[in-house]
Image (cartoon, rainbow, N blue to C red):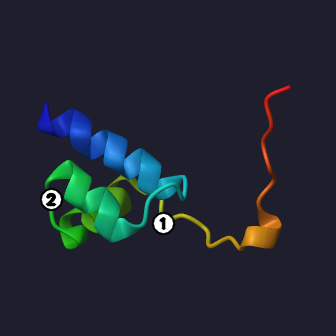
Amino acid sequence: MKQHALRTAMTLYQGGTLELDTAARRAGVSPDRLRRAVDRLGTGAPSPTTETERTPVRAD
């Protein structure tokens, strides 16, 4: 179960949905541990975005 939580946290962090500290807390690991896991997989950290770069999503 912890492996699933770690993968989910990594995905949310990489997608920019969660910040590093929040994603790590939800996975039950330290931020350093989560960062190392992301680096080990070679997918990197999320690219920073600003509010003006985000596209609003609407359900019509």
Q: Residue 47: which quarter of the image? A: bottom right
Residue under pointer 1: 45
Residue pointed to by mark 2: 29
| Pointer 1 with pointer 2, Cβ within 8 A | no
- Residue shown at 74% from the left, 70% from the top: 51
Q: Nearer the viewer, residue 14 or 59?
A: 59
Q: Position of residue 46 (x, y in %)?
A: 54, 64
Amino acid carrying mark 2 in the image: Val
Q: Secondary structure at mark 2?
A: loop
Looking at the figure, which quarter contains the N terminus? top left
- Among the two numbered marks 1 and 2 on one chain, the one whose residue lies closer to the N terminus: 2
Image side of residue 30 versus residue 40, left or right: left
- Judged from the image, the secondary structure of the residue bearing numbered disc 1 is loop
- Quarter of the image with the C terminus in it: top right
Q: Residue at x 24, y 69 (%)?
A: 31
Answer with left or right where residue 37 lies relative to residue 58. left
Using the numbered discs, state the Cα–Cα distance from disc 1 to disc 2 in whole angstroms.
17 Å
Numbered disc total? 2
Q: Nearer the viewer, residue 40 or 53?
A: 53
